[in-house]
Amino acid sequence: MSITPEQLQDLMREVEKEDPIDFADLPFEEDELRAITAQHLCDMADAMENFSNEDRHVTLLAVAAKLVLENLVLHVQLLRQHDIPLSQQVSSLLQNIKKK
């Protein structure tokens, strides 16, 4: 693997400066969650060591797409749970998805 879990955690913190994560009142330490996530992703990358570049790229895109979708679903569920109306952007996105 070309990056260590610790280096990945540092990159995660750097990205979070521009796009912070709201950990709210989760009963976990933020750095512990980063460590678990970074280790898991590095393990995944190691498991793809024998993949072709194209297969690795497609697999990483599939993982990223699944995470973005999961984040969208959790975000909408949270808004609904708290009776917060969806933003125009999210509403438009969901309407476009429904049409397809």
Image (cartoon, rainbow, N blue to C red):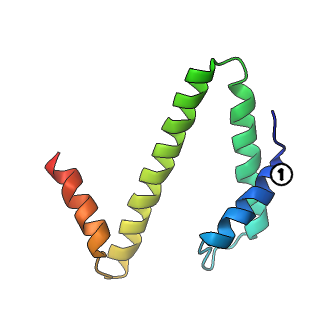
Q: Quarter of the image holding residue 40? A: top right
The quarter of the rendered structure image containing the C terminus is top left
Residue 64 appears at what percent x and percent y?
52, 44
Pick the front one: 82 or 85: 85
**Residue at 81% across, 35% down:** 2
The answer, for residue 35, to whether it is visible in the render is no
Q: Quarter of the image holding residue 35? A: bottom right
**Residue at 51% across, 37% down:** 61
Residue 54 appears at what percent x and percent y?
56, 22
**Residue at 33% across, 82% down:** 84
User: In the image, is residue 54 above or below residue 43?
Assistant: above
Q: Indicate left or right for 9 with 20 as reference.
A: right
* Element carrying mark 1: helix
Residue 43 appears at what percent x and percent y?
74, 36
User: In the image, is residue 64 above or below residue 58?
Assistant: below
* Count of numbered badges drawn on the protein: 1
The quarter of the rendered structure image containing the N terminus is top right
**Residue at 77% across, 51% down:** 8
Residue 62 appears at what percent x and percent y?
49, 36
User: In the image, is residue 42 above or below residue 58?
Assistant: below
User: In the image, is residue 84 above or below residue 6?
Assistant: below
Q: Which residue is disc 1 drawn over? A: 7
User: Dot 1, how many residues are within 10 Å of its Cα: few (below 14), some (14-19), or many (20+)?
Assistant: few
Q: Amino acid at mark 1?
A: Gln
The answer, for residue 69, to whether it is visible in the render is yes
Q: Indicate left or right for 5 with 54 as reference.
A: right
